[in-house]
Amino acid sequence: MDSYLELAEMVLRAARRPLSPRAILDAAYKAGMVPSHLFGKAQHKTLQARLSEEILRLKLDSRFYRTDPGVFFLSEFRADPDIADELKDPFHARRRTRDLAKSSALAISRKFVESSNSWSTDWHNFLAEADRCGAVHYVDARRVPPDFYLIWAFSIVRRSTQLLSYRIGRYRDDRDAFVNRRSIGFTDVVSYEDASLFNNDLGVTNRGLAVVLDDLDLSRSVFGSNEDVNAPDVLFSMLTVDESSQPAILFVMEWACPEWFEPTARRLSLNEVQWIDATRVPNDLNDFEPWSSAALSAIVDDYLRCRNEEKENKRSANSLYRIRTKER
């Protein structure tokens, strides 16, 4: 048990508003809550360090979050209807380039991918067949052997007929074909840790959901007790080669956001956040990074096909697209 964190939790719960570490300690001393073994001239700095360490370590599962630099609140209040909406908006320091230093990244042998007929059946069958044939391996994402395809989750956020888009900063992705481009994807490599006994997709949809919740700063605690957090639906797959000639398979999936969710750049630490129309190809398609450009074209094409055929607006997850990433 950390006495500083327990103290902060009690004070913030009683105050029901965000406070700085100094204000938390002032309130605690006035209420006679500070135990005798806590002392020092810079207790507020110690408390701020403890709060920051917990947020960094536990991320969305932390009891605390920042509402402004140096101001903290309890995560439990983000689901409280009596708390003002502006106080539920976490403040985040801007993240650096996404860390791909995973030693257990999911990869599938190139030989299996290029010889398999499983793409014509179902994406679940493709993964199951790859696993059965011994084509599934876990590799260091920084040094993927050339004869393997790295597996990525590419999650799209949908609201009715709109898709969430943003502009990529170099701190998120420093590849030349991606930096400063618009994107509709929240992406990450799938790893061994994403696999679960409760699904049979080697962790693809678990990673797809995790990257959405992480990038959109949505803790499971903000969902109501009766509101399920559904995994995204896989729409289709893309076979791609990036500028370094490292082949990859993207599982493009769609997550329907809650009605109450409204993105803000401050909340997401993203640039130029906006909704775009998913029923037509944007006039500025060349402004999108290659993965999003290909995904958007496929989504709009499928929408038009489904509208003409009066069928459900969803592309078959059996579809496989082949694209090549290049600098523009």
Image (cartoon, grey):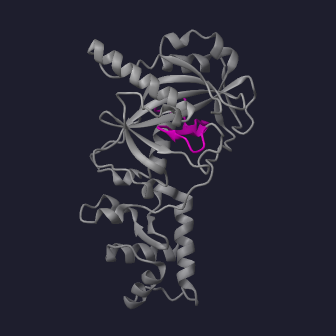
Which residue appears at 35% of the width and 54% of the height? Answer: 222
**In the drawing, does residue 221 fall left or right of residue 141?**
left
Residue 134 pos. (x, y %): 67, 19
190 falls in the magenta region = yes
Which residue appears at 65% of the width and 45% of the height? Answer: 174
Which residue appears at 63% of the width and 36% of the height? Answer: 177
Residue 152 pos. (x, y %): 57, 32
Task: Specify whether residue 200 is in view.
Answer: no
The residue lying toward the viewer, choosing from 278 and 82, is: 278
Residue 91, relative to residue 263: is it above or below?
below
Residue 158 pos. (x, y %): 36, 36
Task: Specify whether residue 300 is in view.
Answer: yes
Quadrant in which residue 163 is drawn: top left
For the stretch drawn in magenta, the main secondary structure is loop
From the image, which quarter does the C terminus lie in? Answer: top right
Quadrant in which residue 41 is drawn: bottom right
Residue 248 pos. (x, y %): 63, 27
Q: Which residues are magenta?
A: 178-202
Which residue appears at 41% of the width and 28% of the height? Answer: 281
Considering every residue shown, the one lying at the far left of the view is 82
The residue lying toward the viewer, choosing from 133 and 157, is: 157
Residue 326, relative to residue 117: is it above or below?
below
Residue 19, relative to residue 131: is it above or below?
below
**In the drawing, does residue 174 fall left or right of residue 145?**
left
The residue lying toward the viewer, choosing from 326 and 26, is: 326
234 falls in the magenta region = no
